[in-house]
């Protein structure tokens, strides 16, 4: 019971003030230590660790930049190659549709998607002109399918 009375007899404002003074002194001591380390160039474990982390971060950043450049170039090359393939495919369909005198109904969506993909990767006016010609000037050919008794599909 005597210990409890001693605890209640503590002057709370003085205790709080003491704690604040101790914290302020610790903060000042830490700041003074940092100033001494910086001023005199003393190397500490914390400084070495920070420098190593910074070096690794810079190295990682440079490596990522180089990889990004490499992949950017590779992606551009792939897009150029794909654009040529799509242009060739549009040209083949263009010639085929002219030879049969129209666009088959079941190929219209595929032809439109092909043209959309071509435009999406930067296709030029030549592909546009061929697509537009087929869509505007060639009739849509209906396609009838019949199934024979042997389950063969015949397109008419």
Image (spheres, grey):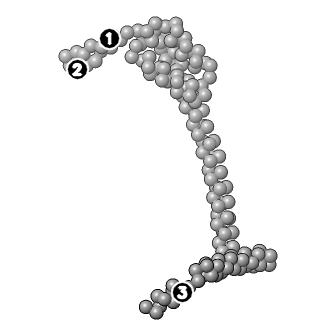
Query: Mark 3 or mark 2, which is nearer the start of the sequence?
Result: 3
Name the secondary structure under disc 1.
loop
- Residue 32 visible in the current orientation: yes
Name the secondary structure under disc 3.
loop
The quarter in which the N terminus is drawn is bottom left
Residue beneath label 3, please?
A: 9
In this picture, is 4 found above or below 134?
below
> x and y percent of residue 80 in the render?
60, 32
Residue under the point 33% across and 14% down? 155
Query: Mark 3 or mark 1, which is nearer the start of the sequence?
Result: 3
> x and y percent of residue 36 in the render?
77, 78
Tell me, for residue 151, which label it has, or none.
2
Tell me, for residue 144, which label it has, or none.
1
Name the secondary structure under disc 2.
loop
> x and y percent of residue 27 in the render?
68, 76
- Of all residues shown, which one is farthest toward the left? 149
Marks 2/3: CA–CA distance: 102 Å
Q: Residues within 10 Å of mark 3 (few under 14, many from 20)?
A: few
């Amino acid at each position: 019971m005597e210990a409890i009375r001693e605890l209640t007899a503590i002057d709370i404002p003085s205790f709080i003030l003491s704690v604040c003074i101790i914290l302020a002194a610790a903060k000042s001591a830490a700041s003074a230590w940092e100033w001494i380390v910086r001023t005199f160039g003393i190397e500490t474990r914390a400084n070495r660790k920070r420098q190593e982390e910074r070096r690794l971060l810079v190295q990682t950043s440079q490596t990522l930049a180089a990889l990004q450049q490499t992949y950017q170039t590779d992606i551009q090359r792939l897009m150029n190659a794909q654009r040529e393939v799509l242009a060739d495919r549009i040209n083949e369909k263009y010639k085929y549709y002219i030879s049969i005198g129209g666009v088959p109904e079941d190929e219209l969506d595929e032809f439109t998607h092909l043209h959309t993909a071509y435009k999406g990767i930067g296709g030029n006016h030549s592909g546009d002109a061929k697509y537009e010609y087929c869509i505007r000037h060639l009739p849509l050919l209906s396609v009838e399918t019949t199934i024979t008794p042997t389950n063969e599909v015949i397109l008419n």
